[in-house]
Image (cartoon, grey):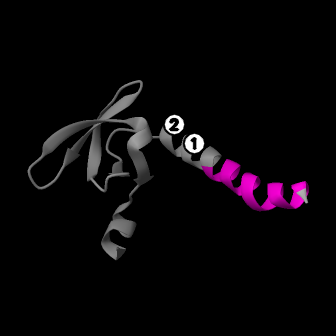
Amino acid sequence: MFVVMYMLLILPNQRKQKQWNSMLSSLKMGDKVTTTGGIRGSIVSLKDDAIVIRTSPDNIKLEIVRSAIAAVTTDDTATKA
């Protein structure tokens, strides 16, 4: 019973967390990102625990923590959505 619960609940969450951590560590300047709050922008600068993104169309710069990044958005996924 415990093995089945581990396979169905814990293992997929661990894989998802590992994938998210690798995405956060591979962020670089110029990447287009989406935050957990739904703000989209491109990375202007990187710090240890925070990043600065520039939003369009007004070119407003926002400093957010790295853990607030939900996804790296490519041009293909931005136009399809």
Q: Are marks 1 and 2 in contact (CB under 8 Å)?
A: yes
- Give the residue at x 38% y 58%: 73
Residue range highlighted in magenta? 2-16
Q: Which of 28 and 10 is in front in this view?
A: 10
Q: Mark 1 highlights which residue? A: 22
- Judge whether residue 30 is colored magenta: no
Which residue is found at the position 55% from the left and 47% from the top? 20
Which residue is disc 2 drawn over?
Answer: 25
Q: Report x, y in % for residue 22.
A: 57, 42
Label 1 Cα neighbours within 10 Å, binned few <14 / some 14-19 / many ≥20: few
- For this view, does 4 lie left or right of residue 77? right
The reply to whether the magenta stretch includes residue 12 is: yes
Task: Give the residue at the far top of this rendering.
Answer: 48
Q: Nearer the viewer, residue 15 or 77?
A: 15
Res 9 quadrant in image: bottom right
Where in the figure is residue 43, as x and y percent of width and height? 30, 41
What residue is shown at x 88% (from left), y 55% (from top)?
2
Question: Taking 30 as reference, is 77 above or below it?
Answer: below
Query: Which of the 4 image quadrants contains residue 8?
Result: bottom right
Badge 2 crowding class, 10 Å Cα cut-off, few under 14, some 14 to 19, many 20 or more, is few
The vertical placement of 79 against 26, above or below, is: below
